[in-house]
Each structure stands twice: as C-alpha cells, then as structure tokens.
C-alpha cells in the first residue's frame, strides 16, 4: 500500500460545479498536511495547508479526518482556471520530517 | 525578488555525459531538496540537505550527486551512472524541516538524453 494515495482521475467537471477529492495516508504519525496545485509542465505550488480544524480559503476548503486518515479538498464554483493536478502532501515526524507526496488528482473543468 | 532559481530550464545530455543542474535560493531557508518527476508520476526525492555541508540520500539517489557548500546553493549532478535520466527535475527549499512548514519550488529543469 502506498503511503499517500490519491485517485488519479481525471475528474471532468462542468464550470460552476462543486468538486471534492480525498487523499488517504497510511502513517498515523503524520503531523502536517498540505495541498499543492501543479499545472501542466510547471512546478507544484502550495495551495493550502490543512489544519486539524479544517480551513477555508475563498472557494477552497480543506479538511482533515485523523480517525480515517484522509484529507479532503473541496472546490466550489469551479473555474476553468482550476484545471490542474492537485497533489496531496503529508509530513510525518517519524520519517525524519520528510514530505511524502501523492501522485496527484487531475481535474479538468469544462465550459 | 525572493525565490528559488533553477537553471538551465532545458538541458540535453548525450549518453555518458555528466550534467549539473543549478539551484539557488535567497529565502534564507536551511533545507533544500531535489526531486525528480516522470510523466504522470508523483515526486520522488533524490537528495536533501538540512544544513550547510550536510546532505542525505533520498529514495532514488543512485546516479546522482550533490553538494551544499553554501546555504543558498544546492547543485545536482546527474552522472553517467544514471541510466534513465530524462525527467523533470525540481529543486525546493524550506525552513526548519522539524517545523510544520512546507517547501517551495523552483520552476524546474527539463533534462533530455539524446
């Protein structure tokens, strides 16, 4: 089992819709969680950190479920510019604090 | 401007050649990282350095070498021992890795073997 797993997609979603995807992690010692966005042939860019209480940034909401060991990303009122690959990242104290990357979920917003 | 600068953006290597990818940061970050990304794949850690003059192997260090003589610089050499080096290489930096902070990336370098 991979340490961090994501549905690769693609998720094909009409513009204006709400879309959500999850990321599961296997290490219960995981402490920090992040969502990155990666456009085609570009570097990943930090989208948001995921706090225990959840957090919201505009149309984006991230949540953490420690009991079931997953994090989620919800995008409301999706825009064409939201089309990208979304990478889930986990940091665990017992892995020398290294970041463990999911392979990403591809999102395509259609007009 | 503050940030992470990678060069060159595109590089072609002949079989048997060593090439060096440059990574410079002016963010005063202690930690620096090199990742490799293949098409449709996740990021794989090659090497990382948490402090000057120290670095550690990541998951796929074979065929690569690094140095960390200055805080700002973490060059990666792709040696001829790396049998399949064609990939997208990403350099990143971050503050104290023992904190909850994450990392930030340069724009990446595309390496192609010809």
Image (cartoon, coloured by chain):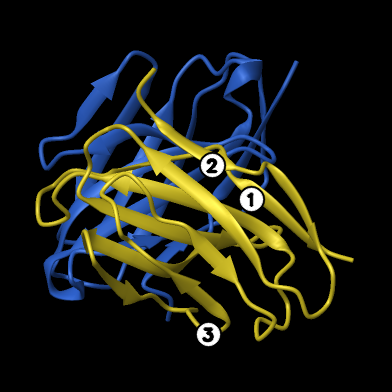
Chain colours: A blue, B yellow
Cα separation between marks 2 and 1: 30 Å
Residue A102 visible in image: no
Q: How crowded is mark 1: few (under 14 residues within 10 Å), some or many (20 or more)?
A: few
Instruction: Return the x and y of residue B21 as percentages of the image width and height.
Output: 58, 55
Residue at 10 percent across and 36 percent down: it is: A53
Label 1 SS:
loop
Cα separation between marks 2 and 3: 21 Å
Q: Which of B13 and A39 is in front in this view?
A: B13
* Left or right: where A33 falls relative to B17: left
* Left or right: where B103 falls relative to A87: left
- Disc 2 and disc 3 in contact, CB within 8 angstroms: no
Residue at 67 percent across and 62 percent down: it is: B38
Q: Which mark is residue B6?
A: 2
Q: Nearer the viewer, residue B106 or A88?
A: B106
- Disc 2 and disc 1 in contact, CB within 8 angstroms: no
Q: How many marks?
A: 3
What subunit carries mark 1? A
Instruction: Return the x and y of residue B77 as percentages of the image width and height.
Output: 56, 67
Q: Which residue lies most toward the right here?
A: B114
Q: Name the residue under label 1.
A: A9
Comes first in the chain, label 2 or label 3: 2
Q: Residue B62 carries which label?
A: 3
> Does B14 appear above or below A24?
below
Q: Which of A2 and B15 is in front in this view?
A: B15
What subunit carries mark 2? B
The N terminus of chain A sits in image quarter: bottom left
Residue at 47 percent across and 79 percent down: it is: B61
Cα separation between marks 1 and 3: 31 Å
- On whether disc 1 and disc 3 are found on a single subunit, the reply is no
């Amino acid at each position: 089992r991979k340490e961090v797993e994501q549905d690769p997609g693609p998720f094909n979603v009409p513009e204006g819709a709400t879309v959500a995807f999850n990321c599961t992690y296997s290490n219960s010692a995981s402490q920090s969680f992040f969502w990155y966005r990666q456009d085609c042939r570009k570097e990943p860019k930090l989208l948001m950190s995921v706090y225990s209480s959840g957090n919201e940034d505009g149309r984006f909401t991230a949540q953490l479920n420690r009991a079931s060991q997953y994090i989620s990303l919800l995008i409301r009122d999706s825009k064409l510019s939201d089309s990208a690959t979304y990478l889930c990242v986990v940091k665990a104290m017992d892995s020398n604090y290294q970041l463990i990357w999911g392979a990403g979920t591809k999102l395509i917003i259609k007009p | 401007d503050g940030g992470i600068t990678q060069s060159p953006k595109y590089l072609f290597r002949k079989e048997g050649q060593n090439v060096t990818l440059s990574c410079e940061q002016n963010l005063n970050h202690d930690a620096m990282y090199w990742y490799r990304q293949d098409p449709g794949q996740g990021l794989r850690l090659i090497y990382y350095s948490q402090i000057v003059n120290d670095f550690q192997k990541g998951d796929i260090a074979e065929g690569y070498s690094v140095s960390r003589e200055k805080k700002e610089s973490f060059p990666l050499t792709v040696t001829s021992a790396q049998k399949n080096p064609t990939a997208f290489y990403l350099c990143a930096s971050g503050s104290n890795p023992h904190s909850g902070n994450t990392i930030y990336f340069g724009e990446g370098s595309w390496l192609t073997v010809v």
